[in-house]
Each structure stands twice: as C-alpha cells, then as structure tokens.
Amino acid sequence: MQIKRLRLSGFKSFVDAADLRIEPGLTGIVGPNGCGKSNLLEALRWTMGETSARSLRGAGMQDVIFAGTATRPAREFAEVSMLIEDAAATEIEIVRRIERGAGSAYRIDGRDVRAKDVALLFADAATGAHSPALVSQGRISAVISAKPTERRAMLEEAAGIAGLHVRRKDAEQKLRATEANLLRLDEVIADQD
Ligand code: ATP
C-alpha cells in the first residue's frame, strides 16, 4: 500500500486546506519546532481510525479541530482525506471528519462507512493507526522495551493477519449473541409446553 496524497482542513494547526502529494521514494518533512510536523503524522493515524485522543496529544477527540489563535477564530470541523494505492494499484480515498459536538464520520470512496470498515481496510494492508511503521516521538524506546505479546502483535501486523483477528472477534461476538438468542428461544418454547 502506498499513500499518495493527504488533504487536511481544520486539523490541528492546519486551519487552511492543505494538499500534500507524496511521491514514490523517501519523503522527509522539515521545519522549525512547532510548525506541525508531528501533526501531519497524527493526521495520518487519525484518518486510519485512531480512537485514543491522548495518543494524539489531546484530552478529547474534538481537540484535533483547529482551536483558534489570537488572529483566527476556531473552526467547527476537521477533515482529513487520504488517497492510497493498494497492492492491486487501485486508488482508494479514505476521509474522516469530526464536527464540534458530534462524533467522527468516515467515508471510503465517497460511501459512508463504519470506523471498523476503515480499521479492516488498513489491517488487511498490514498497516493502521497503531502500525509500528508509523514511528512517532518516543515510539522507538517503546518498541525496544515491548513485552513479548506486544512484539508478537507487531509481527502479526507486519504479516498482514491483524485483520483476521478483528474478524474472529466479530464472529465470536455474533456466536455469543446467537447462543443467547437460542437459549431465550428454548425458554419461550418451554413456557408454551
Ligand atoms: P517539534 O519539532 O517541536 O516536534 P512539530 O513541527 O512536530 O514540532 P507539532 O507538534 O506537530 O510541531 O505542532 C505543534 C503546533 O500545533 C503547536 O503550535 C500547537 O499550538 C498547534 N496545535 C496543536 N493542536 C492544535 C489545535 N487544535 N488548534 C490549533 N493549533 C494546534
């Protein structure tokens, strides 16, 4: 999977719409302290479905919306669009949007989808919001001191089987719900006897 373009609007310090083309090869982001380099990586993770506001250096998820400065009013929403090319060279656009007072909404190629659908798409591509491929500040020491189970999760993700775990959890939940329904059905039938 290759990330080809990132479009941000109202996300953290990116108050004006910003359009970044990511060309093949190595991409470096340089700039003075506080110019928004980490915000860009966070925008990637946020679009991939990050659910922890703390790991995006905020108290709540609404903190990703441009909060205003002395000269510019706060924005009412944040939106990030990411264009990727999958292994079959098909382009896919993933959009996450959050409005003040409302939760996040996701779209894949213009269709409204659930957060889970976005998580699965990236898990199948062996990446995602928690991928060890996204190395933010402090992550290197975290990887070095990871417990064996955490290392195993990294290897499973690299092997592209993380999506299978999500599907298995889903299937187990459905199975439990069906078992509960069957039990209830047995009780209803017994009541009628
Ligand atoms: P460093 O080189 O010091 O690590 P950096 O280039 O990675 O810095 P970031 O940490 O990405 O910079 O950006 C920090 C800037 O983003 C700060 O100026 C902060 O005020 C601004 N910022 C973060 N969240 C918001 C928000 N919700 N609204 C407005 N500005 C924000």
Image (tube, rainbow, N blue to C red):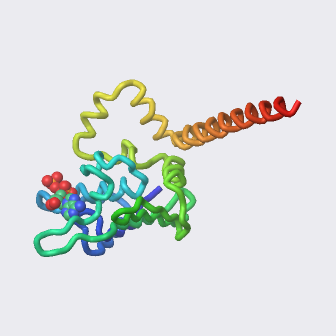
Looking at this rendering, what residue extends furthest in the top direction?
Answer: 148
Residue in front for this viewpoint, 158 or 174: 174
Residue 167 at least partly seen:
yes
Where residue 53 appears, x then y in whole percent? Answer: 31, 49
Residue in front for this viewpoint, 162 or 79: 79
Where residue 127 appears, x then y in whole percent? Answer: 45, 48
Point 55% across, 37% down: residue: 165
Point 31% across, 58% down: residue: 62
Residue 102 placement: quadrant: bottom left
Q: Is residue 120 above or below residue 162?
A: below
Left or right placement of residue 5 versus residue 39 in this view:
right
Q: Is residue 60 above or below residue 76?
A: above
Left or right placement of residue 172 versus residue 6 in this view:
right
Looking at this rendering, what residue extends furthest in the right direction?
Answer: 193
Q: Is residue 122 above or below residue 78?
A: above
Residue 161 placement: quadrant: top right
Where residue 186 appears, x then y in whole percent? Answer: 79, 31
Left or right placement of residue 45 versus residue 156 in this view:
left
Left or right placement of residue 162 versus residue 48 in this view:
right
Where residue 98 appears, x then y in whole percent? Answer: 38, 63
Q: Is residue 146 above or below residue 39?
A: above
